[in-house]
Image (cartoon, rainbow, N blue to C red):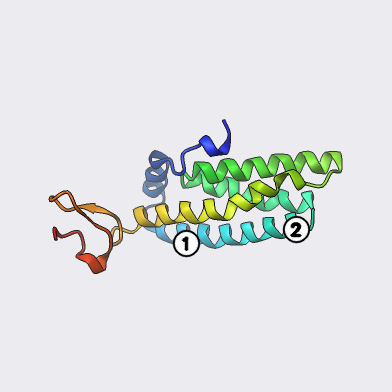
Amino acid sequence: MSYQEADLVNWTEFAKSRSELGTAFLRILGYFREDGEKAIGAIEEAIRAHSATALVTPAHTLKGESAQFGAYRLSALAEKIEMVARRCVETREAPDELIEDVVALRPCFTETMALLDRDANPLVARRPTGFGRRVDSPAQGFGRAV
């Protein structure tokens, strides 16, 4: 299965992680955001430098951390980058075939984090109001029917 076919977020895995991490969940999710930004920056820098070796570690890290939160598409994309980069290291080729995947990485991360943040923070999560209309943010009424 290609990364494009993977669910953006597997909510069962997300809920499992949330339950297992308990009160540390939001803090760990914040670390994931910081680490993800750093990993993506390192991956982008490595692709600009045509360095397959420099792609491997940040892609591997992003793959594992993404999977922990059920961010399956991001994890699959990072895994593809890691595996192709490893092959390129072994064959001593430049990782140019990964350019499109690396370009897709940041938007995938941004979209994923928006969903994770929405579901992780009950004050900004989408809630049904009872009238078929959803209230999307605290400024709109904390889930009250409007």
Image location (x, y in percent) of residue 119: 35, 53
Foreground residue among 119 and 100: 100
Image location (x, y in percent) of residue 115: 40, 52
Crowding near the residue tagged with mark 2, few <14, some 14–19, many ≥20 C-alpha atoms within 10 Å:
few
Q: Quadrant of residue 121?
A: bottom left
Residue drawn 36% across and 56% down?
118
Q: Which residue is mark 1?
A: 30
Quick one: which residue is furthest to the bottom in this view? 139
The reply, left or right, for residue 53 in relation to residue 26 is right
Foreground residue among 2 and 113: 2
Residue drawn 13% across and 50% down?
130
Q: Amino acid at mark 1?
A: Gly
Residue drawn 83% across and 39% down?
90
> Alpha carbon of mark 1 to alpha carbon of mark 2: how far?
27 Å
Foreground residue among 3 and 35: 3
Q: Quadrant of residue 46?
A: bottom right
Q: Nearer the viewer, mark 1 or mark 2?
A: 2
Crowding near the residue tagged with mark 1, few <14, some 14–19, many ≥20 C-alpha atoms within 10 Å:
some
Image location (x, y in percent) of residue 70: 46, 43
| Secondary structure state at the residue bearing disc 1 | helix
- Which quadrant does the N terminus fall into? top right
| Secondary structure state at the residue bearing disc 2 | helix
The reply, left or right, for residue 63 in relation to residue 145 is right
Q: Which circle's residue, 1 or 2, is located before the other in the chain?
A: 1
Q: Amino acid at mark 2?
A: Arg
Q: Which residue is mark 2?
A: 48
Image location (x, y in percent) of residue 5: 51, 35
